[in-house]
Image (cartoon, helix red, strand yellow):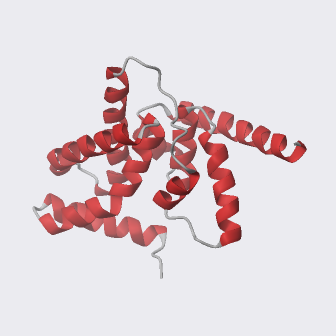
Amino acid sequence: MAMAVGENRILDEFLVIAAQGGDAGAFNLLAHRWQRKLLAHAWRMTGNMEQAHDAAQTGWLEIAAGLRRLTDERAFPAWAYRIVSRACTRQIAGAIRHRHLSEQLAVEELVEMQGAPVDPDLHLDTARVMGLIRRLPPDQHSAIALFYLEEMSVAEVAVALDIPVGTVKTRLLHARRRLRSFLEEKDHA
């Protein structure tokens, strides 16, 4: 039976505290629990799986080095996303080409990374929605994925993406409008 969001957060808080106290096993479990989420986030930001792996790895090095300085264990999710966001930004800034989403990655791979249910009907709906989300510009894609898929609050998304709360709200508003227009296009086609 899957743990509820509240139970997951409590476990993560416990693991952060234990890891801050030097428990390597707790840090490893924390890394195991968060690796896929942070990798998916890095992929959403970079649009490239190789860059995403590099950014996530860099992020984990920074998380490991700075975890003891984290003063509020409840802030770990937004703090970790922010570190990975900054690692992605540095990678993107280092590249000469413009950032765009990779069309080579199949929807099923993203759905699998998010841990979506395998029910065939739900899988088709999830795949359709994920495909539409992939069509969003990267800034809207990241905001909507963190808000809905990772169940973060607007404030947590703002911290994770290192942007103001108002910008998160604007990105979510525009993303919802675009998704609605994508759905209307599909319905009229």
Determine the image quadrant of residue 66.
top left
Q: Quadrant of the C terminus?
A: top right
| Residue 108, position as x, y percentages in the image | 55, 57
Q: Is residue 169 visible?
A: yes
Residue at left offset 69%, top offset 53%: 128
| Residue 79, position as x, y percentages in the image | 33, 45
Left or right: 145 as drawn, with respect to 9: right
**Which one is nearer the viewer's eye here, 104 or 127?**
104
When the figure is inspected, residue 50 is found, relative to residue 20, above or below; the finding is above
Left or right: 22 as drawn, with respect to 77: left
**Which one is nearer the viewer's eye here, 118 or 4?**
118
When the figure is inspected, residue 85 is found, relative to residue 75, above or below; the finding is above
When the figure is inspected, residue 147 is found, relative to residue 50, above or below; the finding is below
- The residue sitting at the left extreme is 22
Residue at left offset 59%, top offset 31%: 137
Residue at left offset 57%, top offset 52%: 107
Q: Is residue 150 visible?
A: no
- The residue sitting at the top extreme is 96
Left or right: 189 as drawn, with respect to 52: right
Residue at left offset 78%, top offset 45%: 183
| Residue 96, position as x, y percentages in the image | 38, 17
- The residue sitting at the right extreme is 188
**Which one is nearer the viewer's eye here, 161 or 107?**
107
- The residue sitting at the bottom extreme is 1
| Residue 60, position as x, y percentages in the image | 24, 48
Determine the image quadrant of residue 54.
top left
Number of on-image labels:
0
